Image (tube, coloured by chain):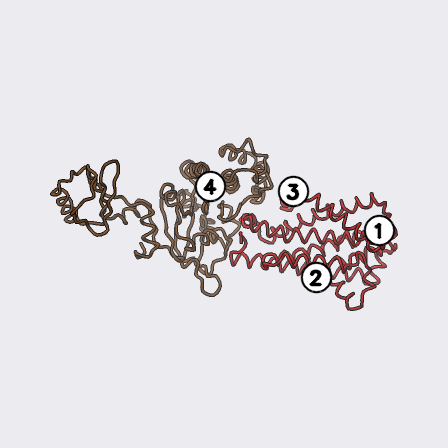
Chain colours: A red, B brown
Amino acid sequence: MLGNETVKGLLVTRANWGTLVAALAVLVVFYLFVQFLIGAGRLVPALYASTLLGFSAYALAYMVSLKAVAGTLEEMNAGTLEQMHLSPLPSWALSLGRLAAAVIEAVGLTALVGAGLILVLGIDISYRLDALVPLTLTILDVAGFGLLLGALAIRVASIGAILHVMQAVVLLLNGSFVPVSLFPSWLQVVSRLLPTTLGVEVGRRILLQGWSLSAVWSDHSLLWLLIHSSVMLVLGALLYQRSILRALHEGRLGPR
Amino acid sequence: MAIVERRTVQGQPVASRIPAIAIEGLTKIYGRDLRAVDGIHLQVPAGQVFGLLGPNGAGKTTTIKLLCGLVSPSAGSAALRGFDIRQQRSSAVMHLGAVLEGGRNVYWSLSAWQNLLYFGRLKGLSGGEIKPRAERLLRDLGLWSVRHAQVGGFSRGMQQKVAIASALITDPPILLLDEPTIGLDVEAARTVKDWIVSLAQEQRKTIVLTTHQLNLAQELSDRVAIMRAGRIVADMPVLDLLRRFKQDRYRIVLATQSELPGIELPAGATVGHEDGATVITSPSLQSRQLYALLARLNEAGLPLRSVSPVEPDLEDVFLELVRGGTANV
């Protein structure tokens, strides 16, 4: 099931490769543009590693949420979401398959953008296996975020505006370009409620400051990330499934 | 409903004796009081082509989606080959393929081949099971040579063929086709129609067909039901329905072209001219009235060429029923 959905997702993406290349190019240019802004008109290599971690997390959230919303809407309008639900599989398994495909695709594309920037800009990051833990939790966090927006896409007509606002808020507040510690305390709380913020903080501590897993566990940052990701994923899954079941009840899974 | 779980009766599987589709009191209420489907009862035996007709908003598409399990009923039940679509959904949908109205039904950015592989796997088939079926379907539909091209680049008729092929990839015994020829040009519609005939006659599929094209329904269906305001107002074999609504209307052809001056015609009669002849189409007449009319024409010296009864078509029946002129039949 997961393989079938993933293969389909990748084939659809490959068929739209022109759009994909343009989207990746925009992300790269956007990253460089913001570097100029925070460097007061010049590129500051010392900021590359830190900002790339935050920006990669944003790019992941951007792609997963876009896939969750635009993909869901497109499938509804094309009637393929209804066809999908003519499968003998339970609807939660179908939703899981779609989510897994979106996440695998987004992780792959984010890795492509990150690797490209690392190579082109010569960014120096010390790769440590410990980082896989916050990376995995951040991916789950973003998956939950995608499910929440996907649930809204099924129910709310103006989901496009909501999606853009949420993506912009994540970019501005997840610490990609301005450390969260510089925000007013109330804004720090808000930013840490958003997906990716806690993951970026833990990731930076491990990859850039050399902290161990036990150290990020001891200062509770990893614990908070674990809680955040778990809540986001469970909440997203419950709401998405509820939206699907309600749409099935009301016959709104098809073209609008 | 556990009918299929019982093994055999006199050596025959019980499943073969149960209707392909059984609907009992099926009702769907949207919001507080919009009754899209209002307590319908139907049984469609295996191998029958069943036309579901009705004006826009009559409840046809909702009925189809209820049968697919894509809409939850407010009351009543629907079963496919004995499997309740709500209680035994995964078994029920394995007997079903559907092409739904209003959507593409398949992925236009994928090829026909990729679509069939995807939908086959979605229904639990292995690649080894899917490939020969996909090849046969694509060859039968004349799409084999373009199987690797994106469906988005196909003509509308070819896209619809891919949608039908995808619905058939598991070789389901029941096929639901919601407006299968809508938006197709004449040639594409003919191809799809021929394919439906082939599925019904050669493969003995049970087909439920909704359409606005009454000639299509008349041509393809063994039996039709006409829906109005969520209810079934007629349900019987096409020929019986036409017979039931047959009226004593006559087509009287005179061998000369005339405006029939001074001839008293029954109210509602129409007069036209065809190839130098005069054609009178009468309303429903009793024999006595018909003979009186023929006598008047004879007295006026108008040569009679032929008199024949007017056979109603499904459109006449449909219009009479949906306009509410007749009680349920």
Mark 3, other Cα within 10 Å: few <14 / some 14–19 / many ≥20? few
Q: Amino acid at mark 4?
A: Leu
Q: Amino acid at mark 2?
A: Val
**In this rendering, the label closer to the viewer, 3 or 2:** 3
**In this rendering, the label closer to the viewer, 2 or 4:** 4
Looking at the image, which residue sits at the far left? B299
Q: Are marks 1 and 2 on the same chain?
A: yes
Q: Residue at x 38, y 41 (%)?
A: B220
* Subunit under mark 3: A
Task: Answer with left or right where residue A196 lies relative to residue A128.
Answer: left
Task: Answer with left or right where residue B42 lies relative to residue B268.
Answer: right
Residues at marks 2 and 4 touching, judged by CB atoms closer than 8 Å: no
* Subunit under mark 4: B
Q: Secondary structure at mark 3?
A: loop
Mark 4, other Cα within 10 Å: few <14 / some 14–19 / many ≥20? some
Which is more toward the observer, B37 or A167? A167
**CA–CA distance between discs 1 and 4?**
56 Å
Dot 1 corresponds to which residue?
A: A48
Q: Secondary structure at mark 1?
A: helix
